[in-house]
Amino acid sequence: MVSLSIIPPPAPNEKSYKVTNRANELFERHLYSEAITEYTKVLQMSKEEENEYLALIYCNRSASYLRLNQYEQAKIDARRAIELAPIWSKGYFRHAQVMLKTNHFDQAIELLKTAINKEDATHVKEMSGYLTRALIEKDNEERLGIRILQLVCGKDIAIQKNVLNPIQNKLFEFASHMKNIIHVLVDIKSKQCVLVDACWDIDSILRFVEEQGYTVVATIITHYHFDHVGGTPPSPYDTLPIKISGLATLLKKIPHIKAYIHPLDIPYIQQANPSIQPNRLVPTCNQDITNDLKIGGKLHIEFIHTPGHTPGSQSLLLNQSRLLAGDTLLCSGHCGRTDLPGGDRKSMEHTLRSVLGGLDNRIIIYPGHDYGVSWSTIGIERENGCLGEELVGFGMKPSSH
């Protein structure tokens, strides 16, 4: 749950306090249905005059419904929170989240503006970031005719625990630590989509795509590391009798699609996933084979070779205005590690200085991991000293792969 400036009101009694804490703990463990049950108990035991505390619980339950994609219930709870505590920003923010998820951008933008006006100065910047993201998504849809959807491991997927599969549960804990972002690129009119770096929980990814009414027509890999492509996990998990669900699983479940990968990374993928047939892998960044990909009538993907993190790392330029950077550029002035096998600091410097550094400042960047930042711009990263002639050295996230 996002941290806003609201000071939580005290619980009216010890029993409410304990049940609320239990509900919050369930939420943090991604047990959203169970959290809803506990929040409902708090609402049932609270008195009508305890408006502030009731508003807080409605906001928390709204967040739980939102994570379960139960948007109507999430909206009802958010509106109830606004009625109970109209001076707080939190109810407006929750309502805006629902509007964003259901692609009602104008309503979301107005609600976020209201939330910002009710925020104190120390938290306005955080709220303004959500407003900017809403404006970007509105532009994606209305001007470009595309959607760029992000599924974060440990938040949106790889969260369902199974008591009968403890090994898978351990891998999902690992996925939650890695915070990979799986991107779903959608041509709105045709409802055709491309999956980028689909990994960790293919079943949930495909379930999401089906619920949205999209059809997967291709998949793209930004680089060969296990957390983006699946296969054999690293030590100490490589001793377990399991492989990470990823590209091999996806190609098996959807036998008519192909995977677009830079040729320098294809051998590594085949080594970790020997079951994948070579004819399912299409080499990119090659004028004679595949330099770009067109999906439906609006989505145009250009492959850009951005080595440094791996020899065949590639970034994806969408409609000349959006960049999926994989682990090459993780935003906030950070790039991917170059001390792992296949990494090369000189190649990374050339990529950051000359390849990505030559792009327009207005291009929106989407990184391959959610390390607290899920988007940026070329201009912002240039100001951070991580791109172009302004490159003054670059920090590598120690936990990235």
Image: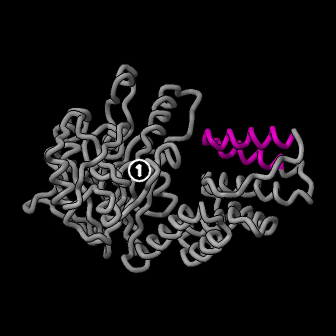
Where residue 71 sits in the image (x, y, percent)? 64, 62
Furthest toward the left, the residue is: 288
Identify the residue position indicated by label 1 in the image.
181
Quadrant of residue 23 in the image? Answer: top right
Residue at (68, 69) in percent of width and height? 118
Which quadrant of the rendered structure holds the C terminus? top left
Residue at (57, 32) in percent of width and height? 162
Whether residue 395 is situated above or below residue 213 in the rendered picture: above
Where residue 367 sits in the image (x, y, percent)? 36, 54
Residue 217 can be seen in this image:
no
Whether residue 276 is situated above or below residue 169 in the rendered picture: below
Q: Is residue 31 magenta?
A: yes
Residue at (67, 40) in percent of width and height? 26
Q: Residues within 10 Å of mark 1 (few under 14, many from 20)?
A: many
Amino acid type at circle 1 is Ile
- For the stretch drawn in magenta, the main secondary structure is helix
Q: Is residue 372 magenta?
A: no
**Lateral position of residue 20 relative to residue 290, left or right:** right
**Lateral position of residue 335 relative to residue 180, left or right:** left
* Residues drawn in magenta: 15-42
Residue 285 can be seen in this image:
yes
Where residue 333 sits in the image (x, y, percent)? 34, 53
**Lateral position of residue 343 relative to residue 19, left or right:** left
Furthest toward the top, the residue is: 239
Where residue 249 sits in the image (x, y, percent)? 35, 41
Element marked by disc 1: strand
